[in-house]
Image (tube, rainbow, N blue to C red):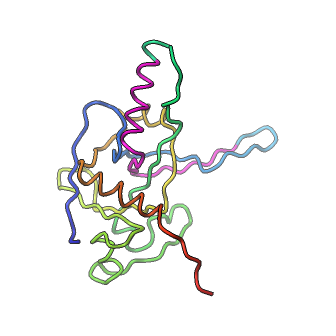
Amino acid sequence: MAEVLTKTYVENKSIVNQCDIFRDVEYIEYVKENENTIEVSKIIFPHVIVLTQACDLQQDYNARKKWEETQQGNQDKFLISVIVAPIYNFEDFRQGNHLEQLGLLMEPKGRRNKSLCDNIIKNENKRYHYLKFADDVELVESVIDFKHYFTVNVNYLNKIYEEKYVCSVDCLYRELISQRFSNFLARIGLPDPE
């Protein structure tokens, strides 16, 4: 597969959807209580992409809207959290310093034309998904690391939507990302040879 331009659009409905991209998303790393103080450690990711299935997000939205209007029924279709993954700046990722601020040293991927890096750009490495955006999108060349997914509260995403929503990945590209993420999660993990 060759390098492909990821098509995006800007949603006008303010409804969280699969493959929406947000900026400055907070992740609560831990909460610790010491005597009379509470310590909260949070990480703010510059960009994340929503990986939760579109049907689940739509059912959550419909159920919440119905509940707000009628205050009847149950909340069976409500989501508690949404699966997201960080989107890393590709050049930082390639050099292995994209998580430097967290004190993590990652494996450098080498030059663009070398096999490891080239396989990532061509989306031939199951762990990563390369994203290249059109010039009119505020995002630089990026990569999703499917191993770094986490969840955020659905109410939090709804609350920050207006301010921190960037764009949405177009349908066909969204389906590809969703399929690649689910394939990564469904892989058979074999032990490392000793």
Residue at 42%, 19% (x, y): give it: 66
Q: Position of residue 109 (x, y in %)?
A: 39, 77
Q: Is residue 114 left or right of residue 187?
A: left
The verdict on residue 171 being magenta is no
Residue 28's x, y, as percent?
58, 46
Front residue of 140/182: it is 182
Q: Is residue 89 above or below residue 9?
A: below
Residue sitting at x 33%, y 77%: 117
Residue 59 magenta-highlighted: yes
- The reply, left or right, for residue 108 in relation to residue 119 is right
Residue at the extreme left: 135
Q: Quadrant of residue 89?
A: bottom left
Q: Can you name the residue that lies furthest to the top here?
A: 70
Q: Position of residue 119 (x, y in %)?
A: 31, 76
| Occupied quadrant, residue 129 | bottom left
Q: Which residues are magenta?
A: 39-67
Which quadrant: the N terminus? bottom left
